[in-house]
Image: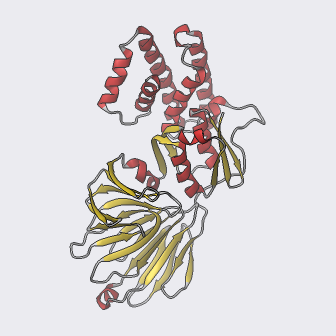
Amino acid sequence: MKDEVLRIIAAELAGEPVAEEERVRVNRWRGVSRENEKMYRMVTGELGEVVRLVRLKGGLDSEKAYERLEGEMQKTMIKLKKKEKVRRMSWWRYGASVAGVLLMLGVGVMVWMKPEEGKLRVTGERVEPGSGQVVLTLGGGEVVLLKRDTSELILADTALRITNERNTLVYSGIESKEASGEMIYNTLTVPANGEYQLVLSDGTKVFLNSGSEIRYPEAFGEGRREVFLKGEAWFEVTKDSEREFWVRTGIMDVKVLGTSFNVNAYEKLEKVAMTLIEGSVEVACVGKSFRIVPGEQFVYDKNSREADVRIVDTEQYTSWKDGYYKFRQTTLEEIMTTLSIWYGVNVFYQNESAKQVEFTGKVKRYEDIRVLLDKFEQTENVTFDIKGNNVFIKIR
């Protein structure tokens, strides 16, 4: 109970949305005993100051701000250890609460508890995202390596124009091909450590995630619009009442008319999923049809061959396209599966129990993986060792 209350308090301090029933739970806990009320006042008072310092960091010299933050937290720990009634809550447990707040703010907290020189827990080579080579394969077999942060003309004729506009591949000027019904397919491949955006001939926007591939026609015909996906992508489909839009994944097919949704269909994962933000879609899977409404997620388990529709916090499944990851009581196994695809690393667990450790918070998508893993270390009793592209995890 105490751990859950501390999580709610940390979430509220960090500016996370907190449900009314969670606030009631905290107030009920405060009223149980005088000790609980004292702990609440102490935690909110001390953490409030830490959060204020972190939020001021952007306008201060980073090094000085971190030094100040470290000093404040050390004072906090000394105060806590001197108070007899709070001694039952272990020192590291309170530190985890503080680190959890900073993790939600997306701020590196490794400096507040600096390991001694030569004893860094997270070690290894620098693993950075965003460096993979994105490849466009044209219908005739020609391969084009797409350059980042530049504008270039890929192809232009009387019927088709393809341009690469700063990390976005755009198809336009193809009315005559749509009329002729000619279907030529292109393939956009994004490797691990990369991402790319695509604007299809009908104006539909696709945000392709790391390690993904999409096959699509240069121009859609008069019938249904179809694309074929491997991996993960976010879609903003242009409305067209006369032409349905289909996303084919091999196991799960998604039919829409115009809406925003996320499809996760990596071949290496045990589950495929579709998360709907707005509009309505129909999912065809294992011979059945499922109608999905906003705020719901369709999930199919490849091992059990079971399909399920559930209500979810959609931000957890779509935040990747906005440059961060959001986790709420998510197991380390799920988190590391996501990060392994993005960073292109292999993950090994030295303790099976490490897979079930849960985290709540937000982390920036473009940081060195060591920075992210260090944040996780501060909030739980788990360590990471990076050797090349391999990450070894164990419980301390």
Q: Quadrant of the C terminus?
A: top right
Q: Residue furthest right?
A: 118
> Percent position (x, y) of residue 296?
31, 51
**Is residue 336 left or right of 8 when viewed as pictured?**
right
Q: Residue furthest left?
A: 241
> Percent position (x, y) of residue 386?
69, 48
> Percent position (x, y) of residue 134?
56, 70
Q: Residue furthest front?
A: 304
The residue at 62%/21% (across/down) is: 74
Q: Is residue 171 visible?
A: yes
- Up-down relation of residue 44 to residue 301 (above or below): above
- Up-down relation of residue 32 to residue 116 (above or below): above
Q: Quadrant of residue 94?
A: top right
- Up-down relation of residue 77 to residue 332 (above or below): above
Q: How is the image coloured?
A: secondary structure
> Percent position (x, y) of residue 222?
27, 83
- Up-down relation of residue 300 to residue 310 (above or below): below
The residue at 49%/73% (across/down) is: 188
**Residue nearest the viewer, comparing 381 with 12:** 381
**Is residue 391 left or right of 80 when viewed as pictured?**
right
**Residue nearest the viewer, comparing 336 with 151:** 336
Q: Is residue 298 visible?
A: no
**Is residue 237 left or right of 186 when viewed as pictured?**
left
